[in-house]
Each structure stands twice: as structure tokens, then as C-alpha cells.
Image (spheres, rainbow, N blue to C red):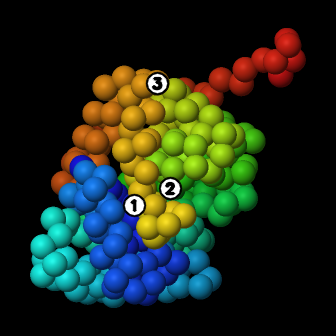
Amino acid sequence: MIDIHCHILPSLDDGAKDISESVAMAREAVKEGIDTIIATPHHKNGRYDNNKQTIIEEVTKLNEVLQKGQIPLKILPGQETRIFGEFLEEEELIHILPLNQTQYVFVELPSGHVPRYTDRLLFDIQLKGLTPIIVHPERNTEIITNPDILYNLVKKGALTQLTASSVAGYFGKKIQKFSTQLIEANLTHFLASDAHNVNNRTFKVMDALDIVESKFGNDMVYFYTENAELLIEGKNVMKEIPEKVKVKKFLGIF
């Protein structure tokens, strides 16, 4: 199994603090049935500044440590990039690292809102031959309030990735319910851990897939696991026609 979103590289961001914590996360991942992880440290978000070359070098180092420790886990390079207006300017673009150096690139929105230029930027990213994947949209306050925002972005070609802990209920029932609604509406294409450590932000991928299987069946589990495989190979992933999230009536009132 492949985890496409994980903060396992040591000392780069708010993920693993040192190599020993990276190794602990690797062992935990293997217990979850994960054999490949795309390491996705934050690119820039005010506190960190991790460029492409730094990440590639750290991935090489961690793979060497895991091989010496006989831990059956492969690390691939990636990056979680917070959306910013200069994303596509030449001097910035050279530091952006797509997932496993394919055409897929993570885009992180602020937790509380969706910047007004998001629609245009995601369109321009696609014009550059890249495919944007919006990470953890189920935890964005504005999208929760107005899911049509996400529908419009997906309809125009953006992909999205849910966090396993959200699906499994570790971020609360509201986010868990919204995650389910996004799955029902074909508004998400990947399920990943976004693991940061082995304590309060760990993998929970098996928990999430068990829930997906119970609610949506084996076909949906296959959809998520196969899309991760297709992504790391740089192939076109599976997509269903997006739908608007249904707002359910309560006692006849919206």
C-alpha cells in the first residue's frame, strides 16, 4: 500500500523531529501495511522553507537508514505546498517538487478560507502541465460551510486528497461526516495519512479504509489504493463525475 502524504523526513517541518522519530514512523507505517511513502514536508508556510533539492537529499538519507535497519519501506520525494500568488513564477517554480517528480503537485489551502485567486491559480497550474491535488479539503472551514467551492474546483480539473484520520473520526464527528459526504459526491480521489508522528498524528489508514469498505464497499477501497499506484507512476488517475454535496433538510428546513 502507498501513502502519498506523510511528514516523515526528520527536522524539516512539524513532522518527525529527528531520525529516531522517522524510524519509529516507518515501523508504524509497515504495521499498517504501507510499503511506500511519499515524503511531503511543507514547502513554505511562514515557518519552513524546504526546496526541491533539500527534500530529495533527505529522502536519499532516510532510505539508506531504513535499508540498514532492514525496514521494508521505500520513501519517495514530494512536497506540500501552501497556495501563494507567486506559485508559478519562474524563480518559485524551480523549487516546487511534484509528487515523486510526476505531474501531480500538492496544493494546501489555509485552514480557514479559500483565497479568491485559487480558481485562477489552479487553472494556470494545469496550463503548465501539472495536476493540482488539494490536500485535506474536509478540514477547510469555508469549504465545509460552502462545499460548492470544492465542487467547482474539481469540476475544472483539480483533484483532492482526504486525510485518513478525518475519515476515521479522529478530527471529530463533523469532519468525519463531511468527509463521507465528499466521498459520496465523487469530490475526492486519494486517501492518505498526513502523519506527523507516532502519537497524536499517526497513520490511521487501515481504520479509514475499513470505514470506507463498510460504507461504500470494496470498489471504493480499490479506487483509493489504485489511484495512489497510478499517481506514483505518473499515469492518469481514476475519476468519477463530481456532484454537489447534498444539503439535507432537517424538519423541512435547510
Above or below, comparing residue 55 to residue 147 in the picture: below
Q: Position of residue 143 (x, y in %)?
A: 67, 46
Instruction: State left or right for residue 135 relative to residue 174.
Output: left
- Residue position marked by numbered label 3 in the rendering: 215
What is the distance, in whole Å, between disc 2 and disc 1 at their CAs? 9 Å
- For the question of whether residue 129 can be seen, the reply is no
Q: Are marks 2 and 1 in contact (CB under 8 Å)?
A: yes
Q: Could you say which quadrant of the image residue 80 lies in?
A: bottom left
- For the question of whether residue 187 can be seen, the reply is yes
* Viewer-proximal residue among 143 and 128: 143
Task: Tell me which label, 2 or 1, sits earlier in the chain.
Answer: 1
* Quadrant where the C terminus is found in the figure: top right
* Viewer-proximal residue among 71 and 249: 71
Above or below, comparing residue 22 to residue 3 in the picture: below
Q: Nearer the viewer, mark 2 or mark 1?
A: 1
What element does badge 3 sit on? Answer: helix
Above or below, comparing residue 110 to residue 227 in the picture: below
Q: Amino acid at mark 2?
A: Val
- Residue position marked by numbered label 2 in the rendering: 135
Q: Position of residue 100 (x, y in %)?
A: 26, 65
What is the distance, in whole Å, between disc 2 and disc 3 at their CAs? 22 Å
What element does badge 2 sit on? Answer: strand
- Residue position marked by numbered label 1 in the rendering: 5
The residue lying at 39 percent from left, 48 percent from top is 205
The residue lying at 65 percent from left, 63 percent from top is 110
Task: Tell me which label, 2 or 3, sits earlier in the chain.
Answer: 2
Instruction: State left or right for residue 179 relative to residue 192.
Output: right
